[in-house]
Amino acid sequence: MAQKRVLVVDDEKLIRWSLSRMLEKNGYLAEVAGSGAEAREKVASFNPHMILLDIWLPDAVGIDLLNEFKQKNDELIILMITANAQSDYVVQAFKYGAEDYIGKPFKLELVEHTIAKAFDKKALIQEPDGFDQGLDDRFELNQMVGNSPKMIEVFKNIRLCAESDCKTVLLLGESGTGKELVAEAINQHSARAKAPFIELNCAAIPENLLENELFGHQKGAYTDASSEEKGIFENADKGTVFLDEIGDLPLSMQGKLLKVIESKRFRRLGGKEELETDVRIIAATNRNLAQMVEDGLFRGDLFFRLNVMVMHLPPLRERKEDIPNLVQYFVAILNREYGRKIESVSAKGMHCLVDYDWPGNVRELRNTIERAIMLENGRVLSPRCPGCEDARTSGRGLQTPSLQPNGAVSAAPPEEGGRRYASLPISGMSMDELEKELIVQALVQYQGNQTDAAKHLGISRDTIRYRIKKYKLAGFGKDANDDQQAHA
């Protein structure tokens, strides 16, 4: 394999020397430049694969050179050199196509790692797609799959937030776009990775319990407060608090959250002492916070404090080129989860999936693949997305038994030629509802024998027992085999 060529552009001679020596030691071909004019000459003559580019040069601004070089060669990998990783120039550099940055003062070991990873990522993007069980191992950011330009931008911003230790991050995106995964990825790739990561869904906690959940309480703070209890901000000290659905945070709590952000101090319920906390706050919402501020539903001062580092997560319809990789990834992990051996996806099925707009985004896609795997008996998956006309009008299938309110089955489904077929409403039915229907049908077919029903569905007996308990299926609380053993 030909040696990679790397150009170091910096006005400090010692930096040029140390980086070029490190590069040569690691098997790269290295050239240096001390000015913008010299950098242009070396780019033309040396034709580098990568440039380590200082933001400030005697005769040029690194951002301008970055934009100029990327316009001429978009395949060129550019890592910015900066003394201030939190500056607006770094964010602007990522927008113009910088792959990553190197902070001053730097450790050569970290620079080596950053350069190697940048080359590895470029190789991964150019690698032909493959269908294999190890697909998920090729994507490092916490099961986040994609190599579209918009997802590469998300990966860059995750790295920026993680390594610069941004104290507040705001994630904006539709439901199902992966905001929780992004929050976890920021945490995992930061210096706070070993500290607590605590998530709170602001829409899921009643307003009268929310303050206690966030800040804790002193003994005797209210009638049932029999002991002292720490809240999330106290338990997450030195770590990360992820506030999902921040747009649903009551106005009464928004001011208290603002105080924590600004002063890093808070009080427990019933307490007089102010406690300190050092946490990163990642907030997420699918709502328009700016509009909520205008409508008086969200505090403007809190919005502007959260609006420092903002990441917009693209809906799936805007990165359809990622759908084949996502499908392969979900098939791989669901094969393991359900003990299936799906080997490929039909061309017609993949075309259907790519053509659909996915209003529920990645979450909806995963549920669709899971449903298809549960219904597929062969090795080639033929998924039908919720928007496909043939999926809604198909007349064949297993007539689901009607369920009484208590979960009991009133009638067994009919059979045709010894085989059951699916004719389930695709739209309007959740994954849980479909799973419940399939389990009921299998249990009816095998007269309540959980072992046989589980085998028919390709899951373990423990799994079906857990699902029976989960869905409160009356009459199926124990296996028929258990009864036989009890009477033996």
Image (spheres, rainbow, N blue to C red):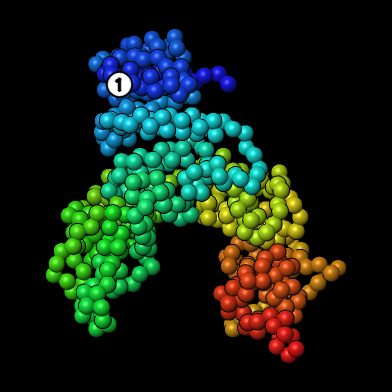
Write the residue at 62% across / 33% down: 128
Q: Residues within 10 Å of mark 1 (few under 14, many from 20)?
A: some
Write the residue at 76% across / 55% down: 378
When asked about the image quadrant of residue 71, the answer is: top left
Q: Is 47 located above or below residue 117 in the figure?
A: above
Q: Position of residue 388 (x, y in %)?
A: 65, 53
**Furthest residue to the front?**
25
Q: Is 157 located above or below residue 449 in the figure?
A: above
Q: Position of residue 351 (x, y in %)?
A: 66, 44
Q: Position of residue 458 (x, y in %)?
A: 70, 64
Write the residue at 70% across / 76% down: 450
From this viewpoint, is residue 290 visible? no
Write the residue at 56% across / 48% down: 357
Q: Is residue 235 left or right of residue 112?
A: left
Residue 121 vs residue 285, the one in the foreground: 121
Q: What amino acid is labelled 1 in the image?
A: Ile
Q: Which residue is mark 1?
A: 15
**Furthest residue to the left?**
272
Name the secondary structure under disc 1.
helix
**Furthest residue to the bottom?**
487
Q: Is residue 3 left or right of residue 399?
A: left
When asked about the image quadrant of residue 476, the answer is: bottom right
Q: Where, quadrant-wise, is the N terminus in this rendering? A: top right
Q: Is residue 183 left or right of residue 83?
A: right
From this viewpoint, is residue 218 visible? yes
Residue 393 vs residue 379, the one in the foreground: 379
Q: Position of residue 290 (x, y in %)?
A: 30, 51
Q: Is 439 located above or below residue 83 in the figure?
A: below
Q: Is 185 located above or below residue 107 in the figure?
A: below
